[in-house]
Amino acid sequence: MSDTAAIIEHGKQVLAGNYNRLPFVMARGQGTRLWDSDGREYLDLFAGFGAGIIGHCHPALVAAATDQAQKLWHVGNTFYTTPQIEFADRLTRTAFPGQAFYCHSGLEANEAAVKLARLHGNESTTGTKRWKTVSMNKSFHGRSLAMIAATGNPAVRVGFEPEVPGFTHVDLGDMEGLAAAVDSETAAVIIEPIQGEGGIHITPTDYIVELRRLCDERKVALIFDEVWTGCGRTGKWFGHQYFTTASGKCVEPDIMTLGKAVGGGLPVGVMWAKPEIAKLFVPGKHGSTLGGNPICMAVSRTIFDVIERERLTDNAATLGEYGMARLKSEKRIAPKITAVRGRGLMIGVELKETPEKLVEKGLAKGVLLNLTSKNVIRLAPPINITREDWDRGLDRVIETIASL
Ligand code: PLP
C-alpha cells in the first residue's frame, strides 16, 4: 500500500465519517497553490470554502502569528488584550461603528447574533416578547441545533428532531411572504447577501431595502450573515455594501456575522453589532473561553491590513467580472451551463446536469474547485490571485466542464 493510501486508510479508522472526503492527502500550500502528499500541484480556486482569503501561508500572516505566538497565546476574556481591540478598529473602519463578540466559527457568530436579537426582543415594551427568527429557504447558517433550524434546507435537520422551535423560512425575494412571516413575536430576520451553500444566489437590492424598512417599522433586528461574503470576497469589504437606497445610502444591518475569511484559515468568528443593540450583552449573557485568541486576532487584523494596502477588494471585483465574462463567452462549455453568476471572486457556474466526480476531474487537470447544490460549481480563489494564475485556473475549469 502506498503511503498516501495508508494515511487515508488510517484516517478512515480514526476520523468521524461526517465529511465526504476525497481520496487525496493535502500536504502543503503556498499562495494559490496546493501540493498533495504525492507532490502533485494544484491551483486552488476554492481556498478552503473561501477562508483562505489571501492564500496559503501568506508571509505577512505567518509573521503576525509568529510574532504574537512569542508574546501571548491566551489569557481569557477576563482581561483586555490589544489585538482584539485593534481588530475591532479595522471593522469599524471598513463596515460601520459597532462592537465585537469574538468566537471561532460562522455558526457561533450566528448563535450569538440570534441570542442578542432575543435580548433585544425581550426588551419589547408592547407586552409580547419577541423571540422568533425568520430566515430564507436555501440559506445556510451553520450546524448547531439552533442554526440547523435557521438553515433553509430541511435535509440538514433530518435525524436531529425535535427541531429547535422559533425558526420559520420564506423564499428569498418574496416580500409578501416575508411580511406575513414577521409577526408580533419575531425578534430577527437573518439573511445572506449572497447565498453561498444554496448555489450563489444574489439577494436583490430592492428586497433588502424593503426588508430594512420592515425591520425598522416592526422593531425587528436585521442580521446579515456575511460568513461567505465578508472580508473582500465580493469586491467590496462586505457583501451588504452593494445594497444602497435610491439616495445612495448603504443599507446596514443591526448585526453582521463573519466567519471563514475573517481568520484566513484560522478559526475565527465575529458577531459585529451596532452599539445600541450590542450593549445588551452585559456580563454573563454570552461568552467563549478562547474567542478573541490573541494569535487569531493578530492574524485577522493583518488580513485586513493586507487587503487594504494591496487594494485587494478592487482585484476581486476586476478579476471577478473578467472571469465571469470569460466563462459566459466560452463556446466549448456553453451547451453544458445554464448560468454564471456571482460578485467579485464568489462565482457560481450552474450546470445543466449534475456532474459525476466533478472535483476529482478538476484535480486531475490541476485545479481545485467545488460543487454545491448538486449542479453549481463554486469558484472562490484567494482574492490576491494574479491575473495569470486566474487565467490558468479558468483554462482548467473550462477544460474540466468541457470534459463532462
Ligand atoms: N453562514 C454561512 C453563510 C455559511 O456559508 C456557513 C458555512 O458554510 C456558516 C454560516 C457556518 O460557518 P461555520 O462552518 O464556520 O460554522
Image (spheres, rainbow, N blue to C red):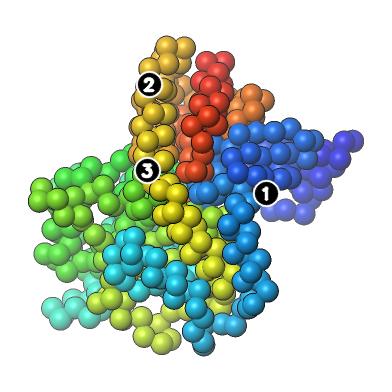
Could you tell me residue 400's position as x and y percent?
Answer: 56, 21
C-alpha gap between disc 1 and disc 3: 40 Å
- Above or below residue 309? Residue 343 is above
Q: Residue at x 28, y 76 (%)?
A: 275
Residue 172 visible in the current orientation: no
Q: Does 14 sit above or below residue 299?
A: above
Q: Return the residue found at the far front.
A: 309
Q: Quadrant of the N terminus?
A: top right
Is label 2 or label 3 in front? 3
Distance between the alpha carbons at the discs numbered 2 and 1: 37 Å
Residue 17: give its label. Answer: 1
Q: Amino acid at mark 3?
A: Asp
Task: Find disc 3 in the rendering and name its residue.
Answer: 314
- Mark 2 highlights which residue? 328
- Residue 247 horizontal side relative to residue 371, left or right: left
Specify whether residue 261 is in view. Answer: yes
Q: Nearer the viewer, mark 2 or mark 1?
A: 2
Quick one: 191 or 245, which is closer to the camera? 245
Q: Residue at x 56, y 78 (%)?
A: 289
Q: Secondary structure at mark 3?
A: helix
What is the three-letter code of the residue carrying label 2?
Lys
Label 1: how many residues lie within 10 Å, few (<14), some (14-19) or many (20+)?
A: few
Quadrant location of the C terminus in the rendered image:
top right
Disc 1 residue type (three-letter): Gly
Mark 1: C-beta under 8 Å from nearest atom of ligand 1: no
Q: Are marks 2 and 3 in contact (CB under 8 Å)?
A: no
Q: Are marks 2 and 1 in contact (CB under 8 Å)?
A: no
